[in-house]
Image (cartoon, helix red, strand yellow):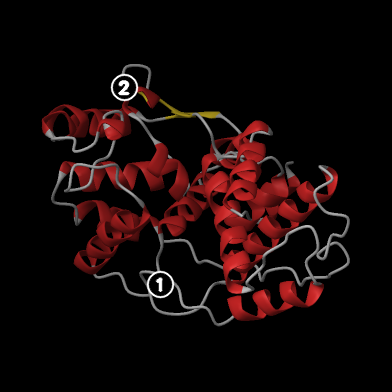
Amino acid sequence: MTTIIRQFKEYLYQVGYSDNMQQMMPATVREFIAHQQITDVSYVEQQKVRAFLEWLQIRPVKNRPGALSDMMIHHCVYGLKTFFTWLEVTGQADYNPISGMRFKKPSVNTRQPLTIKQIEELFTATTTLKETAVLHLFYSCGLRKSEGEAINIHDINFREHLLYVREGKGAKRRVIPMTKKVAADLENYYLNDRCSGKVKKVKDEDAFILNRCGTRMRGLSYWQLLKKLLRNAGITGEVSLHHLRHSIATHLLQGGMSMEYVRDFLGHRQLESTQIYAKADSEQLKLL
């Protein structure tokens, strides 16, 4: 089974899936195979897929309380669909157990964006250059969590005020313009904090944000930093890194930016995706 999962991962790389998807989909397949005790992927009963998906509804989540979200389960379904389709196309399976199954669409997350005042309070609550830099990455630049994790030093041009997302969702690249202040704050962090930090692993030498252990900062560390800032700012309720991305989209639209600009800023392919994150008023939508 190790060989088949490795080959599947190589396929995902070859067709251009993002690094995050190259990790997530094989992990889902590996978990499915282990949970359902699959010994031969050439023929898998549909009932085993159903049993696995039912188990996902109650599977505990690592690093936080609660069950998997509808969206996360949707991603798992997508991973299994991609895997079984690949097996079928490559002749490694004559039967695709998931092809005839129907799944409900994940519920749309109705995140409420933070107000501009709350964003200002978050920046006021920062006490380190790194905290300010992190807020700029996820709010001022509107990065996704995976994009923030992947940002390297050479991805930011301080002089030209540009941030490069080399591989966003769907392997899509984009260039994000920064204000003079955002570029200055990021450069200040780089020169006076990042450059003096000790890197623990060679593979993390290019990482723009390091955690306190000297390795590339990941999602959990980002979340813990944000939680601290929320507490210091007195902001209650459920607020995630993605709320910051949602908030900048809304604030740009409220400030008069066109939906097309915000779509490109966020790295969306379709305007419909942007409308989920940003609450444009009816007058703005009439201008499209």
Q: Mark 2 Cα within 10 Å, few/some/many (few <14, many 20+)? A: some
Sort mark 1 into few (<14), some (14-19) or many (20+) by Cα contacts within 10 Å: few
Q: What x and y, as percent, mark residue 61?
A: 45, 73
Residue at the spot 47% in from the left edge and 78% down from the top edge: 60
- Residue reaching furthest to the top: 159
- Using the image, determine if residue 87 lies above or below residue 205: below
Work out whether residue 218 or residue 44 is closer to the camera in this orientation and state it. 44
Residue at (25%, 57%) from the top-left corner? 225
Q: Is residue 109 visible?
A: no
Tally of numbered tags: 2
Residue at left offset 24%, top offset 60%: 229
Vertical position of residue 255 compared to residue 64: above or below: above
| Disc 1: which residue | 238
Residue nearer the viewer, 187 or 60: 60
How far across and down, in percent of the image, does residue 281 sit? Answer: 64, 56
Inspect the image, locate mark 1, and give the three-letter code of the amino acid beneath it. Glu
Q: Quadrant of residue 57?
A: bottom right
Decide if residue 262 is on the left or right side of residue 94: left
Comparing 136 with 258, the one in front is 136
Farthest front residue in view: 39
Where in the figure is residue 84, as x and y percent of width and height?
Answer: 76, 55
Amino acid type at image mark 2: Phe
State which quadrant residue 137 falls in: top left
Q: CA distance from mark 2 to mark 1?
A: 33 Å
Q: Quadrant of the N terminus?
A: bottom right
Quadrant of the rendering where the C terminus is positioned: top right
Q: Identify residue for label 2.
A: 158
Decide if residue 164 is on the left or right side of residue 189. Answer: right
Q: Is residue 249 visible?
A: yes
Judged from the image, the secondary structure of the residue bearing numbered disc 1 is: loop
